[in-house]
Amino acid sequence: MNIVRRGIGLFGGTFDPVHNGHLCVAREATRAMPLARIDFVLAPRPWQKAVATPVKERLALLEEAIEGNPLFAVNTMELMREGDTYTIDTLIEMRKLVGPSTPLVLILGADQWKNFHTWRRWREFLDLVNIALCNRAKDMPHAAPEVEALVEGRFLDAMQIANAPSGSLCTFTIAAHEASSTKIRELFARLPRKEAFKRLENWLPVKVARRIAAQGLYAGAGR
């Protein structure tokens, strides 16, 4: 069956560094939902997380990771913004950019969903986008009660999420993946470089590993 693809998925993060777990989420999102593309929205300095790796290096790694995939793109919108980075500002800007009728789908993980009530102006998100919740288990963890009340009755099958520009939610599941940016940085900090790269063989895309090695990134990255 031919799938008519429309709309844009928004997958945000610091990608410090991007790894195979991130790519797994994006690939499964394109299988679960009929989206025309997934934008990897690079956050230069998110307010809830400290980031030390220069954004130009994280951008270069991200570009290497998705090269050749026609359904993936890098979105640099947040790099142009001064001050702290808030998702609501990106959603407003994206909606203005694509117009009122293009479906937008914000992709969130289980941990983000549990903390969703702490995000700035979270109650306005569904006025601007749909939300797709990605989980590594069968059941998605509950959000805060006020969030659960807001989204009650709004869930659709993932293949229907692009039927409207905004206002609905869906879930999709990915296979468990151990890759973690934090663990990657910790391994580089703790182990000799050669041994760290060997341990990370299944976690880092080949091109990403090569650039990290060539640029000497994450040396002593105990953060």
Image (cartoon, rainbow, N blue to C red):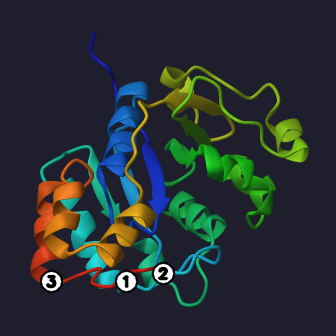
> The N terminus lies in which quarter of the figure?
top left
Q: Nearer the viewer, residue 181 or 85?
A: 181
Residue 172 in percent (x, y) is at: 51, 29
Q: How many marks?
A: 3
Residue 147 in percent (x, y) is at: 83, 45
Picture residue at 42% right of the left edge, 56% below the top: 180
Which residue is under mark 2?
Answer: 51
CA separation, marks 2 and 3?
18 Å
Q: Nearer the viewer, residue 121 or 207?
A: 207
Residue 52 falls in which quadrant of the image? bottom left
Q: Amino acid at mark 2?
A: Val
Q: Is residue 142 above or below residue 205?
A: above
Which residue is under mark 3?
Answer: 215
Residue 212 falls in which quadrant of the image? bottom left
Q: Is residue 186 above or below residue 222?
A: above
Q: Amino acid at mark 1?
A: Thr
CA separation, marks 1 and 3?
12 Å
